[in-house]
Amino acid sequence: MSSKISANFNAGSGGDVIFQSSNSVLFYVHKDALGYNSGGFPNADMVTVDTEPVPLTESSEVLEILFQFVYPRRHPGLDEMDFSLFIALAEAAEKYEVYFAMNMCQSRMRDYLPRYAAEVFGFAGKHDYPHVIASVAPLLIGKPLTEVAHVLPVHLFIPWSIYQQQWTNCLQESMALHTALPRCGRSPGNHEPLWYQKILELQTHLSNNITRLQTPDILFREIIAGKDLCKQCTRNFDKWKEAIQAEVQVQPDFLTFWKHYRSSESDIGRERMVGVSVLCLERGSH
Ligand SMILES: [Zn+2]
């Protein structure tokens, strides 16, 4: 089968190892450059141009960009790249440890938010980029688990499910906090319809978009300010807002939650180990 040859990495540009993309394009690359700027391409030390090309699972489109990052020259800026190509590049950079590409992809992740928040979250969880996880998690707490689950790495699935459930509980509690407030004593006939209408509006906004819990100031200003409520009603809404703020404040950010989850998980693991050893000892003594 005759293969195509890369426009940028070919016999003319030199190179002592040949890689073959998944769509059968050949790339001539210098081993030295790979050695300095990447952690490991398969068999790169063992082959020469005289032997068979080394097959890679990435497409030529990905490799054409990736190999640019192993040479000491101006690297591609990755502007306005289609997300599917970008994430394939980012995965390849991690897999072969192409350091400059890893850094560039990591700093470009933000360009794909909020649209690809779930995918970016999954990537950051898989390759352990805590600051990316931290910035993306708040965007996802309102997304149904069915939209996030397929991109989550296995080790994140349970902690994320629990974390999201905590936010759902926080939402339910926040929406009901107004019931603890004293009702407006002034001419209830005139005040109550507006009071209940505003409660309903606030609850609808919150349940349609759970992330609004994080900025109740903005939400309450939007719904309550300048809406002909008496002083007492306005004060009541202020109290409700403050109660929500207090409720939200005690919710941990995802990284903190995850850290606790992992340490409690390892405690359970230890208990199980102790349980098993006790069992073995008991059996041994019979
Ligand atoms: Zn009132």
Image (cartoon, rainbow, N blue to C red):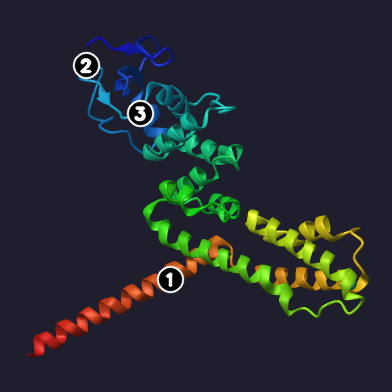
Foreground label between 2 and 1? 1
Q: Which residue is mark 1?
A: 263
Mark 2 sits on what residue? 50
> Secondary structure beneath disc 3?
loop
Q: Nearer the viewer, mark 2 or mark 3?
A: 3
On the picture, is 40 further left or further right than 143? left
- Residue drawn 78% across the image and 62% down it: 197
Q: Is residue 206 left or right of residue 190?
A: left
Horizontal and vertical percent position of residue 24: 30, 18
Q: Residue furthest bottom?
A: 286
Label pair 2/3, CB-CB below 8 angstroms: no
Labelled pair 3, 1 in contact (Cβ < 8 Å): no
Locate residue 229, reporting x and y percent: 90, 65
Dot 2 amino acid type: Asp
Distance CA(mark 2)–CA(mark 3): 22 Å
Please tell me the numbered disc located at residue 58: 3
Give 279 or 219, whichever is nearer the viewer.
219
The quadrant in which the N terminus is found is top left
Determine whether 120 is above or below 198 in the image. above
| Mark with earlier residue (3, 1) | 3
Q: Separation of disc 3 and disc 1 at Cα? A: 37 Å
Residue shown at 51% from the left, 64% from the top = 165
Q: For the residue marked with disc 1, what is the amino acid?
A: Ser
